[in-house]
Image: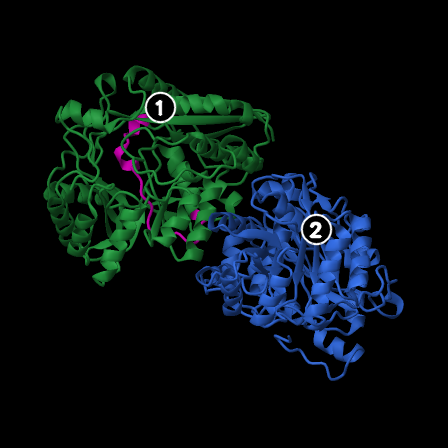
Chain colours: A blue, B green
Amino acid sequence: MRIAELNVTPIAIADPPLLNSNGLHQPYALRTIVELVGEDGISGWGECAGGRRMLDAFEGSRQHVVGRSAFELTRLQLALTGNAPDATQHETLMGRMNPLPAARRVFSGVEVAALHLIGKSLGVPVCDLLGGRVRDRVPFSAYLFYKLAGGGGEVDDARDDEWGEALTPDGVVAQAQAMITRYGFGSVKLKAGAFPPDEEIAAMLVLRNALGPDVPLRIDPNAAWTVDTSVAVALALAETLEYLEDPTPGMAGMGEVHDRLAAEGLRMPLATNMVVTAFDDIPESLRLRAVDVILGDHHYWGGLRAVSHLGTLCHTLGLGLSMHSNSHLGISLLAMTHVAAATPHLTYACDTHYPWQHEADEILVGGKVPIVDGAVVVPSTPGLGIEIDRDALARGRERFERGGIAERDDVSEMQRRVDPAWQHIQPRW
Amino acid sequence: MRIAELNVTPIAIADPPLLNSNGLHQPYALRTIVELVGEDGISGWGECAGGRRMLDAFEGSRQHVVGRSAFELTRLQLALTGNAPDATQHETLMGRMNPLPAARRVFSGVEVAALHLIGKSLGVPVCDLLGGRVRDRVPFSAYLFYKLAGGGGEVDDARDDEWGEALTPDGVVAQAQAMITRYGFGSVKLKAGAFPPDEEIAAMLVLRNALGPDVPLRIDPNAAWTVDTSVAVALALAETLEYLEDPTPGMAGMGEVHDRLAAEGLRMPLATNMVVTAFDDIPESLRLRAVDVILGDHHYWGGLRAVSHLGTLCHTLGLGLSMHSNSHLGISLLAMTHVAAATPHLTYACDTHYPWQHEADEILVGGKVPIVDGAVVVPSTPGLGIEIDRDALARGRERFERGGIAERDDVSEMQRRVDPAWQHIQPRW
């Protein structure tokens, strides 16, 4: 099945003012929507990181994609990314344009579209191309953020504020309760690193009290803390956390946190989507005992098959596996759902930003994918189990053209809206 | 695509009197041929270990296989093998009936048949179900054996002796040259452990002289040597070997060989198909630095997808990857070929016993698969790229029923043909 066309559409989607250690989400998040058209006229769709540089990278990939068999995925990957080792330790992987070569992310978007195309052509769901489902529902976690008042988007695209302000422990609890009410999430993660650690510790303790003992809680300051602070927070939340995600910068720092906690007799799992984002990062993470849980992400790791392989690797090495998320739409949510469905060793509910995206910006026919009882039902229809609303896609492109954001930059947004003197400091506390 | 039928055929194939550390090959090798018939009447075929116990295990699996979707492979695997850890360290994995639970081997045979069925139904080669080929020809290695005079089989099934006796270094060289002339192999492995180490060292040195410096050489005594002997052989063959395979029993022994060689300043890669035969064996092998090269085998590891995942794991951990072989026919050869074609990180030519099997025993339409210039061409036709000759299959079954061998037993054969007092001793030297 030859790939006859590669169509790449940059879009912008409204994004609320969410705080993190790198600053503040801009009014729009950027995504790239990938369409592969097979020689039989069937389309497969993928979604990956957005912005101008990704567009350029897709243009550079076109010669390798068009004319190739949709099944020839590993050769395509080698053609795009070469045999060179993956770059390692992406310390600034959030909050700004990803500084790494874009080829692997381009491949990830194309791979999902190719699997969607294959599945549709053959009449089988994507999970069946990955060994078949082992679960019929994929659990996701509530993803709490400190948040300014206001919805995402601007002018005609301004969205209503579905969640309100959350700048205090009580605000965080209210957000958690609203999200659980609406989506039924069974576990909860707080994006931290926005306020001094004592405030965020307090938020977690108040969350524990409010939600009861049965809801697993996680905290992720995106490397905002020193090793000392990371250890202090872990000790303060020893009874509260399911795992501690990326407390401090760098593999060595994570390893030091592990060793210090072990010396205190505390076995707190350390999770990451920052220091291990490629297979080549794994040996050093093992050597330093830096990581207990990998948050896989098919957008980074090289597609759904790579995450499936990562599952075997984590199982083999005794590591936990969950999934990382950036702001995304339904294509990415369903791609995650299919690979999670086919991966036996998925040990934690997956992250997703999806609740933060507004119904008006979804590009799927039928609107947003339902999350019910904290889970997405694994489709049994061919491919990813979605159809694209081309009018909605065109509106997303218009927002991108109009919005004036070429690359993500949470630092500038923080300076623009909160404090002109604000600087990104890592670790801050 | 539902699986409507599971048909399991035990066969026996003529096998010449090949020596190894466990004794002598019997006149017949046993295989199990697996047919899955889809609801549309299309058949997919697999091949795996033979013998009565495997037949019983297949009967026990029938309820889990028939009626299931051919795509639902991971759920089938869990149903057959459970979530229990794989058993580890198979020290007597050759020369006798495999002592481990047969469920994983049953699954492997069914998985290959399911992928063949899916590929035929969808019109794509099996390698395309594994990410697509990265090479068009898969290299195999000549597999030399010390050998008594005579062909395989008995009575009406007695085959001519295509290779002659090989009981001395000169006999081994003559065998290597004949095999290279006939198949064009570019690398050579000697099954050792049959004669005192000095004789086998001499054989390797004579091979090096005869074949020149450009043909990689390997030796595999199947754990016939003590740690001391293993170290002595490695030092004697330091300039001669590509890798040293399973010199001594057990993971700890292999680790000790590694440490002793490292202390001597020798970096000799240690390969195995005995101490690492499942994902769960890997952590201890890393801890002990026992293994540098894994000889994967889809019959042991859980099918083609498992070996594909193993490739990623070996690449990640800096381990080499090749493939192990037992006596087998063309279904297994092509299954190996498809997964090897789709695995970028295949760092050595694969093992195969295939040249030892006689044309008269092949069950493929068209006879034996060609090995040309030491490689098998990766088929582009649907499925594995084979059709089964049902008459030849029936003849294989008759040989099994007639032959009187219920399970492999190289020890008894050695006692019967060579020395009634012979015992299996591991390590012997």
The amino acid pointed to by label 2 is: Ser
- Quick check: is B363 in the magenta stretch? no
User: SS for tag 2?
Assistant: loop
Question: Residue B321: x percent and y percent?
Answer: 37, 50
Q: Where, quadrant-wise, is the C terminus of chain B in this rendering?
A: top left
Residue B73 visible in the current orientation: yes
Residue under circle 2?
A187
Q: CA distance from mark 1 to mark 2?
A: 50 Å
- Quadrant of residue A127 in the image? top right
The stretch in magenta equals B341-361
From the image, give the main secondary structure of the stretch colored magenta.
Answer: loop
At a point 37% along the width and 34% down the height, the residue shown is B330
**Side (left or right) of B230 relative to B52:** left
- Quick check: is B354 in the magenta stretch? yes
| Count of residue discs | 2
At a point 72% along the width and 59% down the height, the residue shown is A205
User: Which chain is home to disc 1?
Assistant: B
- Quadrant of residue A6 in the image? bottom right
Question: Residue B382: x percent and y percent?
Answer: 50, 38
Residue B51 is marked as: 1
Which residue reaches farthest front? A264
User: Which chain is home to disc 2?
Assistant: A
Nearer to us of marks 1 and 2 is: 2
Question: Residue B269: x percent and y percent?
Answer: 29, 55
At a point 59% along the width and 55% down the height, the residue shown is A296
Q: Nearer the viewer, residue B268 or B170?
A: B268
The amino acid pointed to by label 1 is: Gly
Q: Where, quadrant-wise, is the N terminus of chain B in this rendering?
A: top right
